[in-house]
Amino acid sequence: MIPGVPTVYAPEGWPSTPLPEGTSVEDLPITSPYCVNQSCRAFREDFAEDEKKTPLLGLLEYGTWTVWFYSFWVILFTSIYIYGVASDSIRQRRKRSHKGPYKITPCDKTVALLRFWTYRRPNNRFTRKLGLLQISYGTLTLLGFASVFFSIIPWPQQRYLRARFRFGSPPLSVRCAMVIAALTPLTIAMAGKVNVITWMTGVGYEKLNVVHRYTAYVIFYLATIHTLSYMYLLLIVPHLIAPVQDGGWSMLNKLYANQARELSGTVLYFVTFGLVSLSIPWIRRRFYEAFKYVHMFLGTSYIGVLWWHIHGEYMSPNYIYATVAVYLFSNTIRLFHRHHNLRSFSNLTGFPTTLTHLHGNVTRVAIEVPKSMAWKPGQHVFLRIPNISLLQNHPFSIANIPSLDKDRSVHEMVFLVRRNKGFTKMLFEYNQITSVHLSRLSSELTLIPDKTPTESGKTSTTDLNPPPLTEKKGLKGSTPTATTAKTRPTTNPRHTPITPPTPSLSPPIKSPISPLPPHYEPTYTSANPHTPATHPPLRTILDGPYGTHHRPLHAVYNTVLCIAAGTGITAVLPHVLDLARRLGSGDEAVVTQCVRLVWVVRDARWLEWVGKEVFDGLGSVGVWVEVYVTGGGLGGMAGEGVRGWKGEGVRMYYRRPVVGEVVGGCVVEGRNIVIGELSLLDCIVPSLESG
């Protein structure tokens, strides 16, 4: 016998009729419903034999194996993350001993080959229908290994049921239960925008969400086996049929009446079913706000009901303790390191916000944030504007980089939001009646002004923001580009946020491009309290920034190619501006020699989303911009409306981009990286045609 292991599995009070007088319990056969404990010799002998065949303590190891399995991957990715951060930090501090391309080593080629497979994403009709375009082949490979593991672990060891239910829980159910309990801390560790796994590995929640949902599906799969399973064409329901087989329906009824594990297990199974079924992409996309709050409620209920179900069952409570610890640690990180609105009580109501309505049903959202709030290229923020929608919270990519002006106490965080349904529609239509024209826009994105050498050897700067910054040492040498080589000026451009020229009091001049219908006329809504408006000043509550850790492009790659379509410019423009700023600063840790931005738009008027001034001067520091206008008619033929864009480093094309020209003309010897989707170069027009 096993010390501490209970030996009575029949429900208390079963059978309901008393043992006939004069009958000895010691001599009862095992088939008797009264032979349920150690006082019956047949029970002692059969229980000992059953325990020898399938020891209960051996089944507890399945949870341990599961922990070792996912701990291996977590430790592996954590080690890679720490190594990458450490090596990149050393690389940035170390001065370059020579200029020129990075020397490729066999290790680099191996890593590149591995990335060639792991970074690619399936793009076909089947994956688009299932919504798998955001899952890379690397993620699919990892989930494939996990699927093999979780498909094998419950089944190899035979004896799925015990000889009698009164001898203990069915082995198959115990194996599944231990794996479920072991997976629960991992599921909670990946839940939420701020979580322990992101903190350890640097992988953003948006990528971990795929693994989080997969783990939940595995738990549901194992829970179903724990309750029902088909084998050899016979229905075997371990925790429901087993007691019926042993003692009839009266035993099962008594188990529920006594509030045994069967009752709590039934509640837990339906909670798990609700979590999984309501997380189906079709439901989640259409009812996201309802899904979010229901999911949080059911997730919390799951932990509570699981505690009710497994409390006192050997090792299982240890996994609950681990789950609670992970949950508390994740929320501690979120409270002190991520939610910037909690840093100051004055910002609990949000930050001042300005809306600008642009062509193409796009709204420019500019938020004044404290200087202490910093972000990196490629990150995003969740926006909540109570005046527009009190409860809705939506993620948007940050379209600019922080200002370096030390004299300012605030800087702008800019977003470009296309009008669709729901929140984005309300945002676009907000306060249009009291808006003024776009020409009164008071601020622009962070950019690099044009600064080119003159005949006298001095430099002329197109600087629309008078306060100067400290001059920095320039770069020497030439910069290879996709078409021609431009010589960098010995004096480098300064970097400062600039604003468009102050508008005159005369009415705004119409664009040479035919005006849009009145409903889509570019308009401007100000959150400045001095601007008259019928609505109260807008304030936005920020949650973030969030995003997967990226290696410093300027210290790793010789060539950076950024590809964007439409509002996708918000994802790559910060990278371009950051690289341009570093190229012009004279930093000796910068190894990047060529930066190329390819922006595909359907209408030439969409260029106003960013503004010509943003691209001015980029060519002088080795940044080249190619804009492809693919739409016919007005946008594709009216070249007069966009001639001002054809400056140094900026080229306009009225056609579709070609992969060979874009990639082949940019990739040079050394390390190269592409940010964006190469598939946009082949099939960008159909997606843009839909607006």
Image: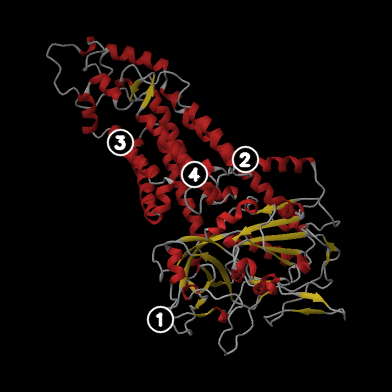
Q: Earlier in the sequence, mark 4 or mark 2?
A: 2
Residue 434 % position (x, y)? 44, 81
Regarding residue 546, the answer to whether it shows in the image is no
Looking at the rendered structure, the number of numbered marks drawn on it comes to 4
How packed mark 3 is, by other alpha carbons closer than 10 Å (few <14, some 14-19, many 20 or more), is some
Q: Is residue 261 left or right of residue 446?
A: left
How packed mark 4 is, by other alpha carbons closer than 10 Å (few <14, some 14-19, many 20 or more), is few
Q: Nearer the viewer, mark 4 or mark 2?
A: 4
- Residue 254 appears in which quarter of the rendering? top left
Q: Earlier in the sequence, mark 1 or mark 3?
A: 3
Q: In this figure, which residue is indicated by the disc labeled 1?
A: 534
| Residue pictured at 60% horizontal, 55% vertical | 684
Q: Is residue 383 left or right of residue 121?
A: left
Q: In this figure, which residue is indicated by the disc labeled 4?
A: 129
Q: Nearer the viewer, mark 3 or mark 4?
A: 4
| Image quadrant in which the N terminus is located | top left
Q: Residue furthest left?
A: 21
Judged from the image, the secondary structure of the residue bearing numbered disc 4 is helix
Judged from the image, the secondary structure of the residue bearing numbered disc 1 is loop
- Residue 107 appears in which quarter of the rendering? top right
Q: Residue furthest right?
A: 456
From the viewer's side, name the closer residue of 539 and 655.
655
Q: CA distance from mark 4 to mark 2?
A: 33 Å
Judged from the image, the secondary structure of the residue bearing numbered disc 2 is helix
Work out whether 239 lies above or below 494: above
Residue 266, numbered label:
3
Work out whether 69 lies above or below 344: above
Q: CA distance from mark 2 to mark 3?
A: 37 Å
Residue 76, numbered label:
2
Residue 360 % position (x, y)? 54, 67
